[in-house]
Image: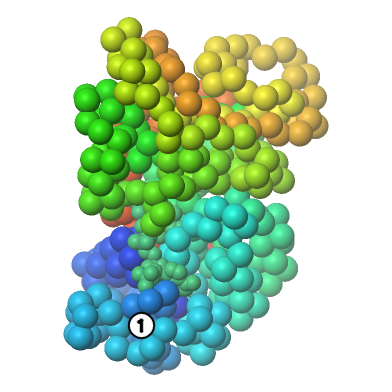
Amino acid sequence: MPGVVTRSACLLGFGNVGRRFCELVARKGDELADEHGLRVVFAAVGTAAHGSLLASSGLTAAEVLAAAASGDEPGTFPYPVRSGVELLAASGADLLIEATPLDPHGGRAAIAHLEAGLAHGMDVITVNKGPIAWDYRRLAALAAAGGRRLLFEGAVMDGCPIFSLFRSCLPGCRLLGFEAVFNSTTNYILDALGEGVGFADALARVQAAGYAETDPSHDIDGHDAAAKTAALANVLMDAGLTPDDVPKDSIRDLTAERVAGARAAGRRLRVVCSAAFGERPTARGDRSAARGKRPAGHVAAAAAAPVRAAVRLTELGPEHALFSATGSTLSALLFTDLMGTVQVAERDALPDQTAYAIYADLLAIHEGR
Ligand SMILES: NC(=O)c1ccc[n+]([C@@H]2O[C@H](COP(=O)([O-])OP(=O)(O)OC[C@H]3O[C@@H](n4cnc5c(N)ncnc54)[C@H](OP(=O)(O)O)[C@@H]3O)[C@@H](O)[C@H]2O)c1
């Protein structure tokens, strides 16, 4: 098609998010071409145990979905599983999309995928927060050295623009700290416990809805929230943290009595992620920062201090700006030097929104934003 650029993608991970991204491209293919001058084909698709696809000439999204449906077992590709690194090297793709599960203990497999993609001259989009939480500085430097893009909008708030908010809409503005509810699985379980639903039933429901992590203990024990906290602090506060630096509370042993007690008092328990320069944040809402009343010179002094972060089970009253984060609603209070407090929220933290984050990153790369 004249005037239309074709990007050839290697997609690693064809689960809740990877599959929905394919469906989105299949649905929006004409619009991508007509309005944005972009066509996306798939040179390879990889999974851990559901086969693979390799077609260097590039399959359309519809052809990938048809291939997944055509195997003996629905959702399984016809070719044997190959390692992600092997697949992306053989694919000849110019774009890597990483949608494999979080490894909360170092993120090594996904980091190797990103490294290999960059080494092969690919632009990289990841919704896997592991690499950004564990190794952001090095990976960003690798991308910059090779003149490639590394984008990860879906790593922290699904499709809600938190990284591109700063990149595109708040030029020159610095993030001084944040408080946020970043994990919808624990929201849902905490809400359900308050309504008298047992822990196991609540977890089964959230898994059926597709927004629990592949291993839900990563949500329950705070690994997902700690990885998101480290990722956001690393990118927007140059924190140099890993998830191991973020102390975290688990909701595993929470009693129904404690949840009911908070509820009876008109309050809610939430898993609150926070970070700040210098002090261990307490997740109570920084009112002075919220009103932009930090003393002169505070920003420079604060930015020189190390970033401290935490994931804490916190009781919030209705006056707190994060009180409304229930179910699949995520919300973040972003304390900035030039814009006071900016609050962002998404009501539907679901795989469709994460698939959209890949789509948005793809357009940002295509349009040089
Ligand atoms: N679900 C959400 O709403 C959401 C929101 C934000 C971010 N994310 C992030 O997005 C990523 C994907 O989430 P998901 O919900 O789509 O997970 P998922 O449904 O469990 O799917 C994961 C996919 O990755 C494949 N996979 C696992 N290890 C692999 C490897 N080493 N190489 C190639 N493929 C591999 C799996 O294959 P098998 O099926 O064969 O095991 C599966 O196709 C995760 O990092 C998650 O944290 C998800």
Identify the residue at image location x=39%, y=57%.
214
The structure's colour scheme is rainbow
Residue 2 drawn at (x, y percent): 35, 83
The image quadrant where one finds ligand 1 is bottom left
Return the residue nearer the eye: 113 or 249.
249
Q: Nearer the viewer, residue 27 or 204?
A: 204
The answer to which image quadrant residue 317 occupies is: top left
> Left or right: 92 with respect to 216?
right
Classify residue 3 as left or right of residue 308.
Answer: left
Disc 1 element: loop
Q: Residue at x 35, y 49 (%)?
A: 212
Residue under label 1, please give it.
Answer: 51
Image x and y of residue 54, in percent: 40, 89
Residue 241 is situated, as x and y percent measured from the top left of the image, at 68, 44
* Pointer 1 local density, CA inside 10 Å: few below 14, some 14–19, many at least 20: some
The residue shown at (48%, 26%) is: 313
